[in-house]
Amino acid sequence: MKRSFILLPIILFASEFEIGGYLNLDTRLLYKDYLFNFNETKFDFYLKGSNEDFNFYNEIWIKEIGIKDFSNLYELSQKEKFSFIPEFVESYITLGGFPFDFMDITLGKQRTSWGTAYIFNPTDNIDPIDLEDIWDFGRRIASFSFKLKMFLGGTSIQTVFLPFFTPGRLPEEKILNVLYPELSQIQDKELVLKIPERNIKNSIFGLKLKRNILKTDISLSYVYGRSSLPFPDTIRILFPDIKMIANFVYPEMNIIGIDFATSIDRFGLWGEFGYFIPESLVLTTIRGVVKSDSTILSSPYYKYVLGADFRQDDRFYILLQYIYGFPDDAGDVMNDFFLLHSSFNFFDHRLELNLNYAFENYDFNDKEFSHLLAPEISYSPLSNIKITAGTKYIIGDYGKFGRLKDESIIYMIFKYNY
């Protein structure tokens, strides 16, 4: 209710409004045992407005995820088993030309999206990662932040300040083994998180400079913060291997980034490079009376992405991208990924065919690969309705893709925009 009273005077002073959103229905079937494992109903609503001095934006999701499992009669009366989850996606206000004409200030819960690559951005490190849906690559959670943007000649300077740390969102328990293979050893687990205190010491700061040079957009960035995904620092296995107790922490990170994007006729080129300077982290494993240490983070490491695309008369599009290091890769553990995306449009975009392919390899000298095949077809009977059917199918047992093999799916999505 408080939020409504705060927004009311802002809305009254706005001279232009826009209301919209969508309804998205997503159902998935596992290839393994042909079980339905995901059924999401998501209602999205946004309201934005502006006048000469400011603009505001508010977006909310109301969603229900999953297929309900009931084990006894009493659960049939528990409202939380049937409830929808409201979530503020973003809620912010931007003051243009404040306090000086060459400055804009944005306050509130907002997404700070950095980088030029497709989906995977090693320079996008302000907001925490969102792995709630393991198949929705690249999703992040908007953060409460203060953003100042300055325009000096042909250079834009952006500073971002997050008062407190917010952890990333992890997937359901059975998918955690993809991120943390060591957790698959024992079924009975106690996983303890050490969240950084919400004080100024653990605030997050980012700085980005952007300029166009020779028809190429070039950006330099710096982030002081923490990994939004936790790392284990202590694992205790109780003898005789009946229970695991693991402590997880969020190490500090200094991240230097550079990215570029340019186009030549119908071709686009881009690249991103992130240089990570982590806080040292040692994993202590205690099994009975035996204790061992292994270094997880010590020396700086880097991730990068290189990509290109081509578009032909709005009917055909193809994208190629090489990725060194997934968002959850760190230290000496870096995998190579190659991504291909192509799109064919027919009948004035009423029918669309997307062919997607990716493979994963630890080292190009290594003969072990895993492949992801992800074709999909979409049909739009009306301009604001799209029906999509597709699959995400993994071949091979290697690496992250290999550990996700049992999650290969067939899916259908209905989306209505208003």
Image (cartoon, helix red, strand yellow):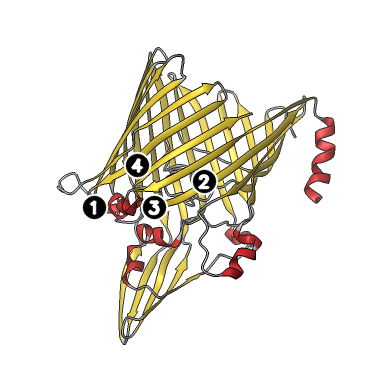
Q: Earlier in the sequence, mark 3 or mark 2?
A: 3
Q: How many marks?
A: 4
Q: CA distance from mark 2 to mark 4?
A: 21 Å
Nearer the observer: mark 3 or 1; the answer is 3
| Residue under the point 33% across and 85% down | 239
Which mark is first along the chain, 4 or 1?
Answer: 4
Say which of 56 and 281 sits in front.
56
Residue for badge 2: 140
Q: Residue at x 14, y 47 (%)?
A: 367
Name the N-terminal-most of marks 3 and 1: 3
Residue receiving disc 1: 398
Q: Which residue type does callout 4 highlight? A: Lys
Asked where in the image residue 104 lies, by quadrant, the reply is top right
| Mark closer to the chain start, 3 or 4 | 3
Q: Which mark is residue 392?
A: 4
Mark 3 or mark 2, whichever is nearer to me: 3
Q: CA distance from mark 3 to mark 4?
A: 15 Å
Residue count near mark 1 (Cα–Cα under 10 Å), binned few <14, some 14–19, many ≥20: some
224 in relation to 294, above or below:
above
* Separation of residues labelled 2 and 1 (CA atoms): 26 Å
Number of the front mark, 2 or 1: 1
Residue closest to the eye, 406 or 292: 406
Instruction: Write the residue at 35% across / 57% down.
Output: 178
The answer to whether residue 352 is above or below residue 148 is above
| Closer to the eye: label 3 or 4 | 3
Quadrant assignment, res 95: top right
Determine which of the numbered discs, if any, sits on residue 35 in the image. Answer: 3
